[in-house]
Every structure is written in C-alpha cells, then in structure tokens.
Image (cartoon, helix red, strand yellow):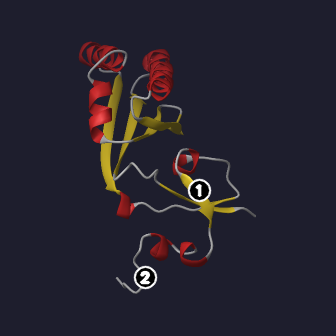
Amino acid sequence: MDRVVATLPGSIEELCLIRLGLIVHKLRALPFAARMGRAIGTSAAEAIASGAGLLRSEPFRVDGRHFGVLQYWASYESLERWSHRPPHSDWWREALERMRKRGDFGIYHETFLVPRSGVESIYLGCPPVGISAFGRTGESVGTMTTSRDRLGRRGERG
C-alpha cells in the first residue's frame, strides 16, 4: 500500500479553501443547477490554466439535489481577484437572479484560510487528490508518520 504525505508548495503560506455548493429546492431547478455546475467546472479549468491562483478544484455530491466544488487557492487575494470578473461574476449574478425570481435554487460558499502550520495530509492507496495533486509529496516515514508530527505538535497533548 502506498503511503504518501503532501505539503503545500513552498510559496504558499496560507491556503485558501472554498466550498461552493448548489442546492436544488424544486426539481424544475435541476437543469439550471446542472448548467451552473458545468459553468463552475469550466471556469475553474480556465482559472487553473491561466495561472489565476486556483491550484485544484474537486467536485463533490451530497445527494442528487446538493452538489458543488471544493477549491484550493494559492491565496485569498487570488480568489477575490478571480471572483470579481467574468466568467465567475456572470454565473454568480445569474444564480442570484434565479433565486430572487423563482426561489427554487440555492447557492452558498464557505471560505477557509488555513496557515501552512495548520495543514497536514496523508493518502493511503490514493491517486493524486487534494493537496497531493499540486503540493510536494513524499513518503510517510519518520516524523511524517503521525498527524501530530506532520503538524509539528510532537510532545503537545490536548
């Protein structure tokens, strides 16, 4: 079994995570939500390719009416710059307008700013996902075998 740990690229001192979700309140909104999901996926691919600061975008699905993406940004400033221009601003306005007029659809985001010292990971038998898809990877040996050690908290007890 592969045991891989990943750390942030050296240039990132604070990782910006955003969870963007879409919730369908009425089935008539499902095609709209699916189109929004595709637009988000397309704009994420563009943001990655253009070097806008998006490091990774991974879709998630809670159920058939609740889905979205988890995105890893190099900084909050990168996210903010990207989110205030098209295509993001276009589909965000369209989603807001749909909610105001029909109320059959919901959209949310949660933003987390995580300092380098607060990030640790391990991947057991996994393809590159999350931080391992863009960060520095290595073997889980020595001081990299426990979560406490990867966080630099050896000797601390809660």
**Residue located beneath label 2 in the image:** 154
**Residue located beneath label 1 in the image:** 137
Occupied quadrant, residue 105: top left
Dot 1: element: strand
For marks 2 and 1, the one nearer the N-term is 1
Left or right, residue 15 beside residue 45: left
Residue 101 horizontal/vertical position (percent): 26, 12
Residue at 24% x, 17% y is: 100
Occupied quadrant, residue 40: top left
Dot 2: element: loop
Residue 68 horizontal/vertical position (percent): 46, 34
Residue at 32% x, 26% y is: 82
Measured along the vertical axis of the image, is residue 75 above or below residue 146?
above
Give the residue type at disc 1: Thr
Residue at 63% x, 47% y is: 128
Q: Which residue occupies the extreme left position in the image?
A: 100
- Which quadrant does the C terminus fall into? bottom left
Residue 98 horizontal/vertical position (percent): 31, 15
